[in-house]
Image: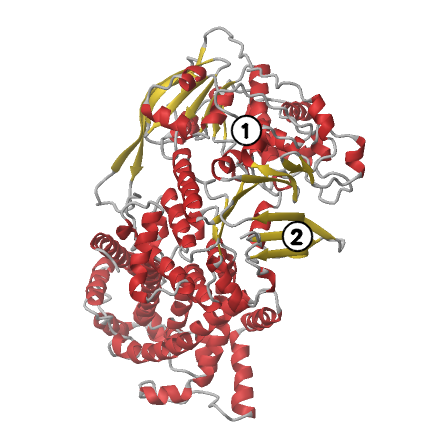
Amino acid sequence: MVNGQELSYLLRLVIQRIFAAFVTLGVVSMVVFAAIELLPGDACQAFLGQMAQGQRLANCRAEHQLDKSPIERYGIWAAGLAQGDLGNSIKRSKPLEEVIGPRFRNTVILGLTAAGIGIPMAIALGVIAAWFRERKVDFWISGVAIFFMTIPDFITGTLLISLFSVWLGWLPGIVIMRVDAPITEVFSQIGLPVLTLMLVMIAHIMRMVRSSMIDVLASEFVMMATLKGLPRWRLLLLHALPNALLPAINLIALNIAWLMGGVLVVEVVFNYPGIGRLSVNAIADRDLPLVQAIALLMAAIYVSLNLLADLLTLMLSPKLRTQRVQP
Amino acid sequence: MSLPLLKIDGLSIGYEGADGVAVPIVNQVDLQLEEGSTLGLVGESGCGKSTLLLALMGYYDSGLARLAGKVALLGKDPGALNEADLQLFRGGDVALIPQNAGQALTPTLKIEAQMLEALRLHTPLPAASRQDRILQLFDRVQLPDPANLLGRYPHELSGGQQQRVALAMALAGNPKVLLLDEPTTGLDVTTQQAVLALLSEIALESQTAMVFVSHDIGVIGAVCERVAVMYAGEIVELGACNQILQHPRHPYTQALLSSIPKLGQAWAFKAPTSIQQGQDRRLSGCAYAPRCEYVGPTCLKQKPRLTRDQDREVKCVQLSEIARMVAPAGGHKGESKMVGQEYVLSVNNLSVSYDHTGWWPFASRQERKLTVREVSFDIVRGQTLGLVGESGSGKSSILRTLIGLQKSFEGEAQLLDKFDLTTPVAHRSKACLSKIQMVFQNPDASLNPRQSIFAALARPLRIYFRLSEPEIRAEVERLMAAVQLPMEYSARYPGQLSGGERQRVAIARALASKPDVLLCDEITSALDVSVQASIIQLLKDLKDAQGLTLLFVSHDLPVVMALADDVAILQRGQICESGRVEQIFNAPEHPYTQSLIKAVL
């Protein structure tokens, strides 16, 4: 139940925050553009390398409008961005949306699947570990989590491949699919990458939930709820968990952002056609417009997920949401 | 019904010490409570009163366990109940009213959800009639506009309202016994009085038995018929409340009562020889012996037993001796020497506003709120001005302005006719900085935990004076002596000191620069009554010995009256009455002052 006063306060706040996010992205776009501009030479020289001379260079420059001033070019680029036009890839000679789009879709599928299974599991494990604090259950959960957190993801991935694919033969070891394969085909192949990402990610969130849950369980209101005679599940789920999750929301958002940015190592180990591998290829090909677009995409992911996390925290903590004058 | 409602036999609660020997927090306690009667448990913090109270609900803090003894409440032993029965027992047979309702209500759940939960668990009411019952309960605890409260979150209520909601929640299950853990400690005096009146009324009407824990014996006296005084986990005196309040017999009870400043009485505090000493629970003799002024040879050898003495039970072997020795309490009000009529501090038309500036550059610029309105006062050298007011009355804003931490204010403030105190602290001269110093409310927060006491005291000395190392050492020694701490303590860190000792260090640090004016911001409100008394005594001594001028801010009227020469009462940022302490107390003119004085027990 949200009353009118609260709603208008919330609405104003949300609009302010969204506006601020756009301002941030605008600044980021300038920084990215300026950084690329500062590189010696221009995009055509970088791409053509030793062949960058004479007519070939002139043609390339004309094609990509490099003969205009940097400010003019930023204006063209930014205006394109505002209309959803990222520009053209030099190497592939097609619109960047077509290059980035399907690969980003693959990364999102992989990331969301890992997050969708991993985050609820991490929260549940954190709550269990906190409840059985410093007992055997906690020891094992925390121990195993730290173990996987400390092993680099490419080792985890390789181990999982040799276990599940080479030894047991249950799951495909590497992904063999076209970039724009249908979703069902993607799902049939991503078992091991999802598992690898989960193992790396769960530990962070689980440990955060555990420690904030321990704090909450020691608080006066949990003691009071216990002494009110509440059953355990009610105590945990209704009184303790919402308060324990608040500090974890931002961490969870950062984890999702990390997944959405394409986890390069995992994509390389499993030969997965996602945004992580694309970014490495773009740099290797010296395809500067593509590098520029990917950098901006990553920034947009981080900014929007952070914004989402902040708004969610706001929604869930009554103290921040209701800024009424005290009676 | 003659069977007692609650019977405790030889209950000991404790933890296992490092050497494997059990250390009792509560030691061999016997208590009984009849149906509908009220019992107070009083003692200083750490005496085991809350531990005892929670044990009645079968709840022990982590690490603690029952070592020996029996509890029978309505014939049930909470320690022997299985989980399902224990859940019915808690909240159904016995309910707790917590110390700090603001912390004890779940912040993410609305009041209604938390009340419904209690009703669903402990009453057979059908879902449809639960809401009406909540409104009835709210009405019962005199909450205004109950229907409107249901949809609110705990933080949207005032402290008094939160406490009333907690009370309504405790009453929801119709418990036979109410346990109250310092239920009014966090409230200001007027709210405290209203809550206490309500509690006595409920005790009288509903015939609910109450066990009331507090460190404030005055609060206990307002509600309870009987009182048990606890020291170091043991009951040292037990009897009718008015008898014990008027004629305390155990030396500890006497010290406890005399350490409470009372209005209208000259306050004479008999400082126990070593009030800071820890309570050693494993002494072979009387636990109070190390602090007792009547201690005799038998006290150290033999553990006393709680024995019947006329109208009560007392645990002391020296009683007849004490009765002989007690002389009429000699009241002397420290005559403050008048050293000329020099105004040390003059404040003229000071207004402090609180600027609410959002980060949003285009939003309405500033929402100005005046927290202090045109306040003026002067303090003569060697005198103490007490500023009294409830929380939010602007007391602290005035101090923050004088010390240069407040950004937006208007008006004039002069120190020694030389220094302009409207200058922010960063722009003040060293001379000015050294002349006015401040002691903060909470020494835990104002002392650097990673800095030894010596370093904390040496720092201002190095800043303000050019001294050699031996001189600094001598000066630190002088400061430690001035606040009555042994020099060995200077090697310790704040975490190794008690709250009272830390506040002494904070005072010593403020004195290091040899200030003319000391600003004290609620410096005793985080402390126990007996420690508070020793700090007040210390300030009085410093005042007499060094001619120190104090501006002492507190919400606690009796404390201010015990220390101050003049008093100014603040209400919503304005001084509504000021004058000499005796005059204000004997003939308060302003209705607010009258209500404050009436509210003090």
Lateral position of residue B550 relative to residue B287, left or right: left
Q: In this view, does A325 lie above or below A30?
A: above
Lateral position of residue A314 relative to residue A244, left or right: left
Q: Where is residue B177 in the image (x, y as percent from the top left)?
A: 49, 52
Q: Which of A199 and B533 is in front in this view?
A: B533
- Residue at image mark 2: B9
Q: In this view, does B422 lie above or below A3?
A: above
Lateral position of residue A316 relative to residue B258, left or right: left
Q: Position of residue A52 (x, y in %)?
A: 32, 72
Q: Nearer the viewer, residue B4 or B315?
A: B4
Lateral position of residue A148 relative to residue A299, left or right: right
Q: In the figure, residue A105 lies in which quadrant?
A: bottom left
- Residue at image mark 1: B260
Regarding mark 1 in the picture, which secondary structure is present there?
loop
Point 50% across, 64% down: residue: B87
Q: Position of residue B14 (x, y in %)?
A: 67, 52
